[in-house]
Image (cartoon, coloured by chain):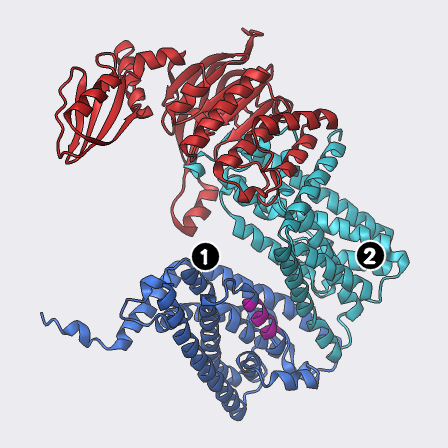
Amino acid sequence: MNTFVPSLKYLGALFVTNLKATLALRVAFWLQAGLMVVNNLVFFTIWPIFFNRYDSVNGWKLGHMAVLYGVSCTAFGVWVVVAGGVRDMAQLISDGDLDTYLTLPKNPLVRTVASRMQGSGWGDLITGIGLLSFSGVIGAWEVPLVILCVACASLIYTSTGIIAQSVAFWAGPIGSLARQFTEFLISFSVYPGSMFSGVVKVILFTIVPAGFISHLPLELIANKRWEMGAALVGATTVYCLLAIWVFSAGLRRYESGNRFGVQA
Amino acid sequence: MKKNNDNAVSVTNLTKTFIVREREPGFLGAVKGLFSAKTREVRALEGISLDIKQGERVAFVGPNGAGKSTTIKILTGILHPTAGEANVLGFVPWKDRTKLGYHIGTVFGQRSQLWYHLPAGDTFDLLSKVYELDPEVYRKRRAELVEAFDIGDLLGRAVRQLSLGQRMRCELVASLLHRPHMLFLDEPTIGLDVTAKAIIRDLVRDTSLRDGSTVLLTSHDTGDMERVCDRVIVINHGRLLLDKPVGELRRGYIRRKMVTLATVEEKIDLTLPGVEVIESKPYRTVVEVDVTVTPVEAVMQAAMKASRLHDITVEDPPMEEIIKTIYAEAREKEPALAP
Amino acid sequence: MNPTTAQRVHPLAKYAALGAIAARQTLVDRAVLLGRAVFIGLFLLIFSQLWKTVLSMGQRGEHSVADLVWYLLITETVLIATPYLHLDIEKDIRNGDVANHLPRPVSYLWSQVSQGIGQLVVRFPAVALCGALMAWGLTGELPSNPAGLLYALPLTFLACCAVLISNITIGLLAVWIVDINPLVFVWQKLSFILGGLIFPMDIYPDWLRAVSEWTPFYAYLYGVGRLAYTPDPMVALGSAGMLLFWCAVFVWIALWVYRKALRVMTISGG
């Protein structure tokens, strides 16, 4: 743990540099962020339309949907703004671009995940926070709880992203497959968790952990049961540790240079 | 363990074998490859031993796939060797990669460490935090390098707007900010024009002399090794072929020059001892000159007498030629070793 | 050998050959096909769960779960099975490859259309069949009156063709605007809302539905999708009429844009 604080500082320094780089292309940045807001809002319109006709989904109403979508959206935004490099990891790995990061005297995972900021992520953040504020479900007292939920959800997005992309250490360029995995995760996280059951539910709390990204946070915010919070924090820790472990295992393989064939 | 304190690098019997997967084509092949892998061994380094003294400037030459990059990657901690020992500045690179990182600087060919959309100065600031430099020390060092490398005018511009030569100067500054004891340069002049190459070479040499830092560079270009380095190590097929001071190599191997003559007359007749016509086309003749027999100046004079010249160029033989000569010699000495 | 035989080949034969080769290419690229099928399966899974949950609670609703899932199958098929030719065309225009096509004795526009239909001939059955099996597996039943599917099948293919032509037209606009992505983006969002991609327009507020009826999105998504639970020949005829009207409009626009684009390309050299 003695590397935790320096790593966090390093992440901060990378964030500042990334922010400068993103703002250097101002027009592109506003366009990306703006289009993302429109995209998310258009997507969300299905819910007002839906609840115009039906009363509820297992007790969940429009305000709850706003919280669900808001948590998932904000968490995704935080992820790709702070650690947008995860989305390109498979490419970096299979192109051998980790080399320059490895000769630096700092944690290569931090350098890799924070190698890029995705400008559109700010659009996700804006929509997410907007939906959370206007959901009518969240009062001032719930704000810390929401922050906890968003933090956990974005860590889960990040760590499952790292795991999926790190498969590239073994299997070569699988970037599009790893992105597809994230798409699935997003898709499941923006629909009410209460409608899934059986095998699907098990999958949503293990392999495609959309359950921890938005379904459990929504329950937690609505019911405020401490064991739900504990489960959320516990699960987040597990996914983070798993991500670090998988990346380290992959890095050992990278260091011992089995990717010769990919390079040639 | 024979550890000499004067040595920045000491390498004993370094060996690296890659396991290459042979993948079947197509989607199904990729899936199959996940379960059963047909593998093949590729031997990149077959027992290399060498020592580099503190402050020495060494060029690592050899054709593509000779093992140059593999060696550099092992010495910087990126790759683990299959067998053998190495010590860089008192560290075993693949065990103490992070600690070693504070003391070395690297420039990897066309792999930029500068942030593309930002001015280089922003990358420098970030690196000062990465290397945990004291702000005051950093400020001074940066000013010193900015002056030496003449990049003051470039600092305000985004890296993407710089020419390749300008960018390479900034790359070098980025890798020198923390006053590394050792500099690893992998093809530092690749893609540059003649002027930019000359500037980079002088800067690397001057910096090394000023800081007393050790340099290990790989290159395809004989100019890099001649202008920057004191010592040349030639490897091929993962084996050391030659390890000599640069001067000796020049005297020993670069005794031939290529002279290209563009003439007004259709043909030119040059018969001098040690001069061999390689290519003869109308208005264009290429000769190889053995400078130990006839100096180049004598050839030029003879050519000017024999015809009117449009143009004349004198070149060193390409690296491949020199290496061929070295192979030939290696074969004579140790027939078993040579390829 | 009669040297004039080559010239006597019917022009349609050329385009048929282009379509055939595109179809074969699509057939070989199985990973993409599989990806599409998995994607439609995922959406059907999510929404079948949604409808089961909502409708099991005795809420008012004139459609059954099966009706709504089969509706979604049709609308998603229209968008997922249709090839994204605008991306290829934009690339052709941007890197100048389109210039290589111009001297050939085929129209670039019609060669794109025939290749698109060639791809569609493979992708449509693959996506529709996988989706149908999934819809059937998830709900355990066919729509309340399966006869509607008989009308829906040809019209869904026609809807794909309409989308195909609109995609090609958007791609050709790259001659004037450098980046067509924002345009594609807006078009997709409009399809999403005004076409009723996810929910049938019957549950939309009246004003939104009234607006959407004037747009092509209504014709190629809701118009076809509703046949899943409306096996009325008159409704099918209405849908077909709307669809044919919009197809004609799209083709007319495509021809107009192509003629203009051709002029720009032959002057500036692509």
The x and y percentages for residue A54 are 74, 78
Q: Please name the residue that numbered disc 2 is placed on.
A: A220
- In this view, B214 is above or below A203: above
Q: Is residue C83 left or right of residue A181?
A: left
Location of residue B324 (image quadrant): top left
Q: Is residue B43 left or right of residue B334?
A: right
Q: Identify the hue of chain C.
A: blue
- In this view, B243 is above or below A83: above
View extreme (left): residue: C1
The x and y percentages for residue B264 are 17, 34
Q: Can you tell which mark lies on residue C31?
A: 1
Near mark 2 (Cα within 10 A), the count class, few <14, some 14-19 or many ≥20, is some
Look at the magenta stretch and give its main secondary structure. helix
Determine whether the residue tagged by mark 1 lies in a helix, strand or loop. Answer: helix
Magenta stretch: residue B145 in it?
no
Pointer 1 with pointer 2, Cβ within 8 A: no
Q: Can you tell which mark lies on residue B241?
A: none
Q: Magenta region: which residues?
A: C183-192
Near mark 1 (Cα within 10 A), the count class, few <14, some 14-19 or many ≥20, is some
The x and y percentages for residue A211 are 71, 56
The x and y percentages for residue B255 are 28, 15
Q: Identify the hue of chain B.
A: red
Q: Amino acid at mark 1?
A: Ala
Task: Tell me the quarter of the image containing the N terminus of chain B.
Answer: top right
